[in-house]
Amino acid sequence: MASVVLLGIAGVAAMFDSGPALSAQAGRETRKPRSMLLVSATPTRLVHNTMDRVPAPGGPSEFLMFQKMQVELLKSRSVLSKALSHPDVAKLPSVVRRRDPIGWLADDLTLTFVGELLYIGLEGDNEQEAVKLVNAVTDAYLEEVVNADKNRRKQRLNHLQVILRKTKEDMRVHQENLKALAERAGLEGNDSVTLSLRRQMLLRELSNGARESLRVKLEKGEAEALLEVKKAAKDGGDDARKAIAALEERLTVLAKQERLLAEDKSRLYAESHSLDLAAMDKEASRDHIHPSEEIARLVGAEVEALKLELEAPNRVQLVERAMATTRP
């Protein structure tokens, strides 16, 4: 015969058959209605453990610890007080006459493990009342412990999904900002090589513009000096007048070139400044995006793991509710 381990409130080991439990008390027969729960010997195994889940390798030692924890939770005040507060239970004579209903119920409940089966039983003179009490304790345990843990994981999943959506939206906005910065700077790509090439082109254009400005300035100075000489000359013939007109026309052209070169120089400096700002903004955006990508990766993995775990059956499941063997 396979051995049976009994983990009860009083810590008593016992054996019992598959039928309704019977016991003799003060010379009279009493019955022990019981409910049956299936407690898996191994926890739900996931591809990835969730962040709030301590990795549990399973095995005899882990299952024994899990059994002991369920016994303690079943006899906890939160579970027993919820069971006793049920309208159909609170008015039972066996409850009303107790000075300490929680203490009485904790002492009289028997919690028995047979392999992966957990039996919750209660002896009593009134079998109907015992059935109601056992089922109330079973329901309270499932609601306060088993389902509460799953609900907590559902809340965590919802919270993580909000974080994931916000992180992805934040990344999308920053990606669009990067694209806008590149377009504003006249770039076709977002890489640092493109920025460097564009900056080199601007420096070359500024250098060429500076040389051309110097040439125009020198030529303009020479033309102005020559014009003064021509105007000061005593020879006022047609050739002199034509030479003066040509110099004045040339000075007008040079002045226009000088103005255009100055405007071009301002444009190039502005573009260079914009490019530098774009590069800094791009770097700042990248610094923001990289951590966001890592957050999205970790949170996404956690979300998928929680989804898988929530789809799996509970480790503790109700098999059978307590039933009376006699009519009231």
Image (cartoon, rainbow, N blue to C red):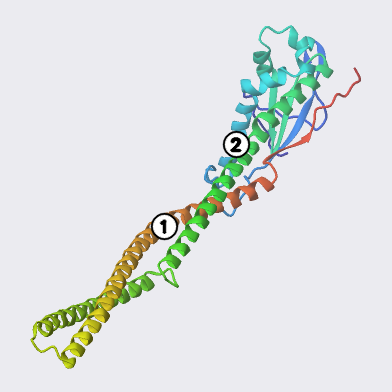
| Location of the N terminus (image quadrant) | top right
Which numbered dot is residue 285? Answer: 1
Percent of width and height locating residue 8: 65, 25
Percent of width and height locating residue 328: 90, 17
Amino acid type shown at disc 2: Phe
Name the residue furthest bottom: 239
Foreground of the two, 323 or 87: 87
| Residue 73 appears in the picture as rendered | yes
Percent of width and height locating residue 226: 12, 84
Foreground of the two, 304 or 86: 304
Q: Are marks 1 and 2 in contact (CB under 8 Å)?
A: no
| Residue 9 appears in the picture as rendered | no
Amino acid type shown at disc 1: Ser
User: Which quarter of the figure has residue 28?
Assistant: top right
Q: Callout 1: few (<14), some (14-19), or many (20+) C-alpha neighbours within 10 Å? A: some
User: Which quarter of the figure has residue 18?
Assistant: top right
Q: Callout 2: few (<14), some (14-19), or many (20+) C-alpha neighbours within 10 Å? A: some
Secondary structure state at the residue bearing disc 2: helix
Which numbered dot is residue 65? Answer: none
Q: Eyeballing the image, is 114 above or below 213? A: above
Left or right: 238 in relation to 206: left
Q: Which residue is mark 2?
A: 66
